[in-house]
Structure formats: structure tokens, C-alpha cells
Amino acid sequence: DIETSGLPNAAEFLEPVEAAKNLVDPIKIAADVAKREAARLEQVGLDWNLGRIVALGWQYTGGTVTADVYPDEQEETRLLRVFWEDYLEWNRPRLIGFYCRRFDLPYLIQRSRYLGVKHPEIPLKRYGSTDFTDLYDLLTFDDAPAASVMSRSLTMFCRRFGIPTPDGAITGADIAGCVARGEWEQVRQHCEQDVALTAALAKRLG
């Protein structure tokens, strides 16, 4: 599991925002543009071209959960290198994650590219992969467009399968704020918690 946050200079790589077409008052136009820009900047941490990895957690089968935080790009680079080296040293073990095919793995690979970290090629095809198992794809039948009243989140699936989830814990949406305030232990604990939940859910599914 990874936690991410936007790059400080992310705005440099964004197209200009346009105000709502129905506005004519210059003050209202400026306010609408500012509002739209702020909302967009809140989301840049989800874009692997505009964000960076601030925490990475994992657990080997039968082992304990490990989670590290990356306060700066230098540390991010070092720990990404360690992660990939361990992955290869363990002979490319099957990776298990939740929504990892469309988020965690592309983010790890893209950040490695930007930071010049050597990484293995991992085909992110939906079907027949021997490199990873995405529990999200498994539990949503490859994101089938059926009626879905229940949230398809990791926490909700764990609750549905009777796996205890912590009360009052921060969510992924809180990570950027924690990073801005320097609350790195909060970030680490959240990442660790998600790895533990992912492992418990994987075990429950056999």
C-alpha cells in the first residue's frame, strides 16, 4: 500500500482553469476560478505525474507489517530503490493489493521513472497476471457496472467480511494535510493499518 501527496510545484503542469460560462461579474469570475483551482490542487496527489509517494507499506506472507515514510524526494528515491531490490531478491513474489493495478503499481513505476530508480517491468493487464492480485478487481468482478449501493472501499469490504477496522482513524483524504503539518507518524500508522487490512482481507479470501 502507498500513501501519496501532491508535488509543491504541481500547478506548473496544469492547464489554466476556466470559470463557469454563466458568470459575467469579474469578481465572481475570479472567485470561481480560485475555487476551481483549489479543488483541483487537492486532487493532484492522486495523479502519479503530479504527486509523490510519501509512505510505502508491505507485509511478507506470515511476517509483520512494515511501513516507511518519505519526508523528501531523496528519501523516497532511496526507499523505492530498496523496495525494488527486495522484490527482485525475493524472486518477484506475487504482489497483493487493493486497487493496486490502477493506482499503487502505476504510481510506484512512474515515480521510479521520474526519480531514475531502476525497476522491473510489471505488465498491468487486468486478466491472467502472475505478478499481482488486485483484491478490488476480485471483489468487484473486475469493476462490473452492476448496481452498487455499498461503497467499494477497502474498509467497507473488510467490515462486510467481519474484519475489525479501527474507529476514528484518518483516511487517505487526510494524508495531504498530515504531510503539510509534518505529522509523519500519522501517515505511517495509516499506511500500516491499510496493509494490515489488505492482508487480512486477502487471507479471508483464501
Image (cartoon, grey):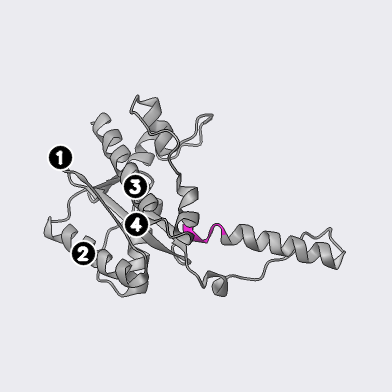
Residue 104, position as x, y percentages in the image: 36, 54
Give, as a three-letter code, the residue at label 4.
Ala
Write down the region rendered in magenta.
Answer: 42-47
Q: Residue at x 12, y 56 (%)?
A: 91
Left or right side of 130 for 12: right
**Gap in angstroms between the C-alphas marked 1 and 4:** 22 Å
Q: Earlier in the sequence, mark 2 or mark 1?
A: 1
Give, as a three-letter code, the residue at label 2.
Val
**Gap in angstroms between the C-alphas marked 3 and 4:** 10 Å
Q: Earlier in the sequence, mark 3 or mark 2?
A: 2
Badge 2 density bin: few <14, some 14–19, many ≥20, Cα 10 Å: few
Badge 3 density bin: few <14, some 14–19, many ≥20, Cα 10 Å: some
Which residue position is annotated with label 3?
189
Which residue position is annotated with label 2?
82
Between tags 3 and 2, which lies in front? 3
Relative to residue 170, is residue 117 depicted above or below? below
Between tags 3 and 1, which lies in front? 3
- Nearer to the camera, 138 or 59: 59
Secondary structure at numbered mark 2: helix
